[in-house]
C-alpha cells in the first residue's frame, strides 16, 4: 500500500518507519520536500521511503496520517487539494494542546466547543476522517504488545462505518492491535472526548514516570 505521513516529528517518523518495515511504500511530507529531517530519514530507511511536501504526501497515499502539531494542523489541512484527498481514509492522530501555561496542558481555546478531528473533517468533506491513536505514546501506536502483551484498549471515531472497519483491520495487521480491544466511540463528534483525554494522559505520565501505559475498559 502507498501511505502518506503528514508530519516529521517523532510520531510521524515512528509510523513511517514501522510501515516501511511492514512492506508499504511511505512518503513523509513536510512544508518542503527538501526538509533535512526527511532527507535523512529517506537515506537511513532506504527502499520504499520517499520525501515530499504535505500536498504530495496526501496525494501519494492510498490513505494518509495526520501527525502534526495540533496548533498548526488545520492550517496545513487547508492547503491540501480536494482532488488529492477525495474518497481517501485519513487517520487523524492530532491533539490540540496548549502548553503555554505549563503541565498538564490545556485544550486550545478554539477547540473547546468542537474538536480538531471535527475541524479536519469539515475542511476535508470528501475524505473519511478516522480519529485514533491520539491517546497513547508513539511506541505503543506501532506495537500494541509494548504494554500488557497488547491487552488494553484503543479508541476510534469517525462518520463512516466502512472507513472505521478498514482502519481497524489496518491497525490489527500492521501494529499488533487486537480486534476486541478496538472501541468505536461513534461519529467524529466523539473526537471531542478523545482529545480531552490527553491532558489527563499527560498527568498520569508525569505521575508514574513512563509513557508506556494505556487504558483498559472493564465491564
Image (spheres, rainbow, N blue to C red):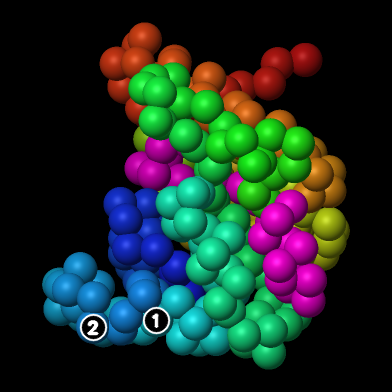
Q: Earlier in the sequence, mark 2 or mark 1?
A: 2
Residue 210 in the figure: left or right of residue 144: left
The answer to whether residue 121 is left or right of residue 24 is right
Q: In which quarter of the image is the C terminus?
A: top right
Q: What stretch is highlighted in magenta?
A: 118-141
**83 or 106: which is nearer to us?**
106
Say which mark, if any, is on residue 34. 2
Residue 16: image quadrant is bottom left
Q: Position of residue 168 (x, y in %)?
A: 67, 54
Q: Is residue 125 magenta?
A: yes
Percent x, y of residue 39: 19, 78
Residue, far top: 207
Rendered location of residue 117, percent (x, y): 67, 51
Q: How many labels does the image show?
A: 2
Furthest residue toward bottom: 83
Closer-to-camera residue (84/176): 84
Residue at 56% in and 37% down: 108
Query: Which residue position holds label 1?
Result: 53
Residue 4 appears in the picture as rendered: yes
130 drawn magenta: yes
2 and 1 marks in contact (CB < 8 Å): no
Q: Quadrant location of residue 28?
A: bottom left
- When asked about the image quadrant of residue 215, the answer is top right
Q: How crowded is mark 2: few (under 14 residues within 10 Å), some or many (20 or more)?
A: some
Q: How crowded is mark 1: few (under 14 residues within 10 Å), some or many (20 or more)?
A: many
Residue 146 x/y as whole percent:
38, 35
Residue 175 visible in the shown view: no
Amino acid at each position: 500500500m502507498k501511505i502518506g505521513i503528514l508530519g516529521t516529528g517523532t510520531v510521524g517518523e515512528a509510523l513511517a518507519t514501522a510501515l516501511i518495515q511492514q512492506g508499504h511504500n511511505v512518503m513523509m511530507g513536510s512544508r518542503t520536500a527538501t526538509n533535512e529531517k526527511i532527507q535523512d530519514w529517506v537515506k537511513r530507511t532506504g527502499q520504499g521511503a520517499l520525501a515530499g511536501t504535505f500536498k504530495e504526501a496526501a496525494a501519494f497515499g492510498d490513505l494518509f496520517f495526520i501527525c502534526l502539531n495540533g496548533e498548526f494542523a488545520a492550517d496545513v489541512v487547508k492547503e491540501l487539494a480536494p482532488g488529492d484527498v477525495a474518497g481517501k481514509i485519513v487517520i487523524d492522530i492530532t491533539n490540540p494542546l496548549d502548553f503555554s501555561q505549563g503541565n498538564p496542558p490545556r485544550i486550545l481555546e478554539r477547540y473547546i466547543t468542537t474538536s480538531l478531528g471535527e475541524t479536519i473533517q469539515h475542511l476535508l468533506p470528501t475524505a473519511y476522517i478516522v480519529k485514533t491513536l491520539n491517546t497513547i505514546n508513539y511506541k505503543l501506536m506501532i506495537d500494541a504488545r509494548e504494554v500488557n502483551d497488547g491487552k488494553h484498549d484503543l479508541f476510534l471515531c469517525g462518520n463512516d462505518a466502512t472507513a472505521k472497519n478498514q482502519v481497524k483491520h489496518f491497525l490489527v495487521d500492521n501494529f499488533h492491535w487486537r480486534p476486541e480491544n478496538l472501541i468505536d466511540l461513534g461519529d467524529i463528534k466523539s473526537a471531542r472526548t478523545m482529545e480531552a483525554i490527553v491532558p489527563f494522559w499527560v498527568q498520569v505520565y508525569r505521575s508514574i514516570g513512563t509513557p508506556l501505559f494505556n487504558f483498559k475498559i472493564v465491564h
